[in-house]
Amino acid sequence: MHAGPGKHGRQNCHGPAYFPARCVSVKINIARFGGFCFGVKRALDIAQKTIATDTRVEMLGDLVHNEDVITEIERAGIRRIKRIGRGAGKTLLLGAHGTALKKIQTAQRRGYKIVDATCPMVKGIHKIAQRMEQEGYAIIIIGDRNHDEVHGIVGQLNKRPLVIDRLHQFPVRAVNKIRKAAVVVQSTQNAETVFKIIDELKAYIPDVRFFNTICKPTRLRQAEIRTMPLENDVMVIIGSRTSANTQRLCQISHALNKKTYCVQSKQELRPEWFRGARSVGVASGASTPATTIQAVVDYLKRLNK
């Protein structure tokens, strides 16, 4: 959306240091699809309801991938843990990215009450992978091998799946051994990269069943970020460096506009980035709070003064 004069932009007639030194309307264009996605909102709602009724609540790892959000959750009284300990009288909150079955079973054995905040779209990936494994297909996951969501998918299966996280390190030897494969995708992957990997897989495996499990919020954000960098002098992408979907937006935007800056908050912004700019695009990851986005917009507004 365009932030025009009197809203998020203003008539620039005084020759400021960073925007053009003549009377122009500096545009601050905010992505239509930004801020919390459905899965993040749902996880936070579950967390709030849980802490309202249960006094001893722990979350296994990060509920969502944003440091500011995690800080707020901890302030609300939910304790973050890395390992499953004794759970008698405690509630364990599972993150939005999904959790391996063995971890859930371990927590239950140790006395935890389980509250599952896994995104329903991620749950859908679990069900597809489990069903196709039962039908005799080798499971291939296209995703970041060290990401929580991929760990969660791997942890639903009886056999170790093949994880492919980049095209230039395509595992030819492993793929050559597979005769039929079902392919699922981490929900926040770059669609263009995924389709290139699928084409490569089909060149080696006779029977490939592909399930495009990139979620709708990711598709919408990536579609928008393929045009915004071409329409703006500078791009600012807001989100955590641990957020896979934010990093995808950064990669796509930077490939189209070298003046793309990826930040976690307004504190990382530098005024010299915007020197001479007549338009600035602002996009954000799926776990970026609205308050963080607004703080960046307010910073850009002040540069106009």
Image (cartoon, grey):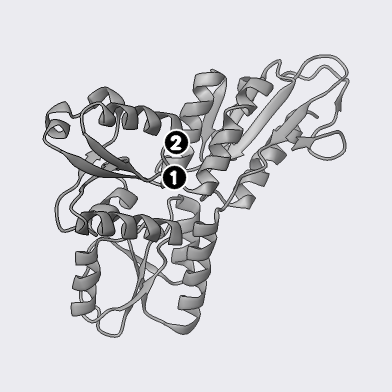
* Between marks 2 and 1 in the image, the one whose residue lies nearer the viewer: 1
The type of residue carrying mark 1 is: Ile
Residue 278 position, x and y percent, is 75, 20
Residue 71 position, x and y percent, is 46, 58
The residue at the point 56 percent across, 53 percent down is: 36
The residue at the point 18 percent across, 29 percent down is: 171
The residue at the point 15 percent across, 50 percent down is: 160
The residue at the point 28 percent across, 54 percent down is: 129
Tell me: 4 left or right of 126: right
Disc 1: which residue: 214
The type of residue carrying mark 2 is: Gln
Residue farthest front in this picture:
206
Image quadrant of residue 25?
top right
Q: Find the distance from the CA under tag 2 to the CA under tag 1.
A: 15 Å
Residue 232 visible in the snapshot:
no
Residue 218 position, x and y percent, is 51, 43
Q: Earlier in the sequence, mark 2 or mark 1?
A: 1
Disc 2: which residue: 247
**Which quadrant would the N terminus be assigned to in this image?**
top right
Tell me: 179 left or right of 268: left
Image quadrant of residue 194?
top left
Element carrying mark 2? helix
Q: In the rendered view, would you say 192 is above or below 48?
A: above
Tell me: 13 left or right of 267: right
Q: Nearer the viewer, residue 172 or 207?
A: 207
**Which quadrant would the C terminus be assigned to in this image?**
top right
Count of residue discs: 2
Q: In the rendered view, would you say 16 is above or below 53?
A: above
